């Protein structure tokens, strides 16, 4: 009797749904919220970096501690609500808008 090893096809390519969170198994509604949070977090971080702000300076503008800015810069999306990220964008003079698809 011979044993067969199950070989993983490491070159297998799967087509994305367009939302990584759906691809990871989250239901559609939760995946949309997670994608919005991740996108908004990236835009807030991009704005902070473009302005050459230190974490301390950004914390002052955003009204949070430096460690919260550090979490934002490191992409810890689970630590930030959509509301908080919208508030951060507004405080940076970049009001966020959500547009519903037709």
Image (tube, rainbow, N blue to C red):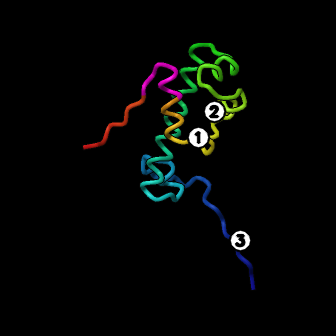
- Residue at the bottom extreme, as displayed: 1
Left or right: residue 57 versus residue 100 is right
SS at badge 1 = loop
Q: Residue at x 63, y 33 (%)?
A: 72
Is tag 2's residue or tag 1's residue first in the polypeptide sequence? 2
| Residue range of the region highlighted in magenta in the rendering | 88-95
- Residue at the top extreme, as displayed: 52
Left or right: residue 93 versus residue 101 is right
Residue bearing the label numbered 1: 80
Q: Quadrant of residue 75?
A: top right
Q: Residues within 10 Å of mark 1 (few under 14, many from 20)?
A: some
SS at badge 3 = loop
* Residue 50 covered by magenta stretch: no
Q: Are marks 2 and 1 in contact (CB under 8 Å)?
A: yes
Label of residue 5 in the image? 3
Q: Quadrant of the C terminus?
A: top left
Label of residue 42 in the image? none
Q: CA distance from mark 2 to mark 3?
A: 43 Å
Depicted 91 relative to depicted 39: above or below: above
Depicted 9 relative to depicted 102: above or below: below
Q: Residue at x 52, y 59 (%)?
A: 25
Q: Residue at x 54, y 31 (%)?
A: 42
Q: Residue at x 50, y 48 (%)?
A: 20
Q: CA distance from mark 2 to mark 1?
A: 8 Å
* Residue 89 covered by magenta stretch: yes
Label of residue 72 in the image? 2
């Amino acid at each position: 009797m011979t044993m067969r090893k199950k070989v993983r096809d490491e070159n297998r390519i799967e087509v994305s749904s367009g939302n990584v969170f759906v691809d990871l198994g989250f239901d559609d509604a939760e995946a949309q919220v997670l994608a919005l949070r991740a996108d908004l977090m990236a835009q807030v971080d991009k704005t902070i970096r473009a302005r050459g702000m230190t974490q301390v300076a950004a914390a002052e503008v955003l009204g949070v501690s430096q460690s919260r800015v550090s979490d934002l810069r490191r992409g810890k999306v689970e630590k930030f609500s959509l509301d908080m990220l919208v508030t951060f964008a507004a405080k940076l003079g970049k009001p966020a808008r959500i547009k519903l698809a037709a």
